[in-house]
Amino acid sequence: MASDGVPPPLIAAQLNYLLNHFPLSVKVDQMWSGSKYYPGVLDRFTIAIPYCLDVVKWDVIYNVESPMSAPDVIFGPDDENFHPLSAKSKTDSLLDDWNSRDPTRLMALIQELRDRYVEYQKKRVAEVDDDRLKFEISTIVFREGIEMYMSSGAEKPEEVRFAVPLTDMNIDKMVPGCPWRHPPKIYLQVMYPVGRKYGSAPSAPRLKLVSTSELKAIFSIEDVKLPPWSDGMCMAEYLPHLEEFLEKQILEAVSLIDVRRRFIEALAPLFGRPLEADPVFCRKATFLAGSGVFTFLVHFMIPTQFPKLPPALMLQSSQHLNSQGVPLKSLPLTDYPWSPRWDVSLMAERIFEFLADEALNFKRYCNESQLQH
């Protein structure tokens, strides 16, 4: 569908407010015009709304020829039984007294529809004829924020998916100067195939940890090895063990920020003050270095697993450019003397000694690259 054009000002104001103020990260998938008289005016769009660690896509249909009217919303093909406007509700009142000049109206509508979608999916899951699922739901019903999704289709088996919010540690408050707009979240995704009978020892569900992107600055959720799921275990038993395990991992990850900070500080006596450094998470630092008259930058990219894993070093010439006028850089360097048991001052010294030799190789590479151009 066409996307060349612009939305009318009133629609643009509501859409921008939705994208900038909705508590979850909503994205526009596509935009198009529904008018044969104003083909360059985009009055319809598809939005992708996070739900149950995935997204649902809904079409929002305005009418540029009736700009004061409320939009229609078309839900996905898997949700043909979702009819949030069929009975009198708060959603109806939002549409009945629609004010197209109020930029907050679309966000309020989408929030209300998403809340009703949460309840719709819970009802679908509750109706599944599966003893094990009914038991699992009964044991975790007290937990706040759980989302459920029932997936089915002609070519795929029925499956129920849970998104379970985990430990509420206010990680952002544990990191001084943290720039995150919202506290990072960690979820356990639990996927159950739909059966009919509750066996004495049902198999473990499929499990996956998922986190919001902000957490990657201090903690890689992909590196976490989940505790084993014992035979006959249910979610209500598993979750407390998992949360205790995660809290220890997070506390260690936060403590490693200070280890990275001390490492950057240990580089200063050898390289001088850093030109720039990440003051919050201590994941990056850049120093100016030289070998004779050859000057270059040393970029330190420090992993969250430091000091278990060494920093990646990248050299950038201050005197050599490629054919596009971009400074020449080395590939990331990690193959140098390193031990996680060394003191940070010794780590810095060994890197400084390594770069004394590597600078000559990098200078030769830069000179040869310029000769080729």
Image: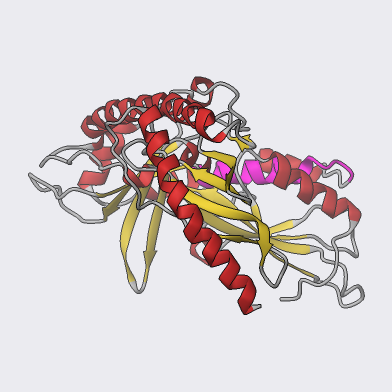
Relative placement, left or right, of 92 versus 336 is: right
At a point 85% along the width and 69% down the height, the residue shown is 5
At a point 37% along the width and 24% down the height, the residue shown is 251
At a point 23% along the width and 34% down the height, the residue shown is 238
**Which quadrant of the figure has residue 28?**
bottom right
Where residue 257 sits: x, y (%)? 45, 28
At a point 21% along the width and 45% down the height, the residue shown is 132
Residue 61 visible to the viewer: yes
Where residue 115 sits: x, y (%)? 57, 41
Where residue 368 sits: x, y (%)? 57, 72
Relative placement, left or right, of 192 versus 277 is: left
Relative placement, left or right, of 161 versus 75 is: left
- Compared with residue 227, is residue 55 higher up or lower down, i.e. above or below? below
- Compared with residue 231, is residue 8 higher up or lower down, i.e. above or below? below
- Compared with residue 24, is residue 296 higher up or lower down, i.e. above or below? below
Relative placement, left or right, of 112 versus 363 is: right
* First to last magenta residue range: 101-118
Of 15 and 167, the residue lying toward us = 167
Of 2 and 151, the residue lying toward us = 2
The C terminus sits in image quarter: bottom right
**Which quadrant of the figure has residue 111?**
top right
The N terminus sits in image quarter: bottom right
Spot the residue most to the left: 200
Residue 165 visible to the viewer: no
Q: Main secondary structure of the magenta part?
A: helix
Spot the residue most to the front: 292
Residue 259 on the magenta segment: no
Q: How is the image coloured?
A: secondary structure
Where residue 321 sits: x, y (%)? 68, 64
Count the labels in the image.
Answer: 0
